[in-house]
Image (cartoon, rainbow, N blue to C red):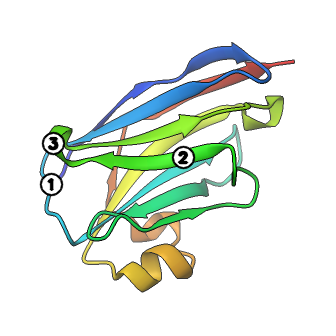
Amino acid sequence: QLQLVQSGGGSVQAGGSLRLSCVVSEWSFGDLCMGWFRQGSGKARVGVARIYTGDGGTYYSDSVKGRFTIAQDKEANTVHLQMNDLKPDDTDIYYCAAARGMSDIRCLYLVPMPGDFGYWGQGTGVTVSS
């Protein structure tokens, strides 16, 4: 049973940076699709970025491409989301998620839904003021 523990987040002004971290209790390289999702009040959870731990391949949504970077630290069993040039529209609760047994094709080139991820972090708030 994987456990995901998040840290980071907080409040910044527009143009600032934050880093979110997600520590994974068990790290089985080669078979984890790790994702970051965002969710606003009363809204559906939406994917922001994903990384396939087997080969380090990444995916970004259009809204964050060029500003956010997802990366893995295998020694620390951690996935980070570096968020630069933050905008007020980035304000939300952010969740990390893990899926076991998902192919790299599905993780990075298709659109895995939140329901495809069996393990979730506790969520962390990001607030960007103008």
Of badges 1 and 2, the one in the foreground is 2
Q: Badge 3, how many Cα within 10 Å: few under 14, some, many 20+?
A: few
Coordinates of residue 50 in the picture (x, y in percent): 48, 60
Would residue 14 be found to the left or right of residue 8 on screen? right
Whole-angstrom CA distance, mark 1 to mark 3, is 10 Å
Q: Is residue 25 above or below residue 54?
A: above
Whole-angstrom CA distance, mark 3 to mark 2, is 18 Å
- Secondary structure beneath dot 1 equals loop
Residue at mark 3: 75
Residue at mark 1: 27
Residue at 15% in and 54% down: 27
Q: Quadrant of residue 78?
A: top left
Q: Amino acid at mark 3?
A: Glu
Quick one: label 1 or label 3, which is nearer the N terminus? 1
The mark found on residue 3 in the picture is none
Would residue 66 be found to the left or right of residue 69 on screen? right
Whole-angstrom CA distance, mark 1 to mark 2, is 20 Å
Coordinates of residue 68 in the picture (x, y in percent): 61, 44
Would residue 112 be found to the left or right of residue 61 on screen? left
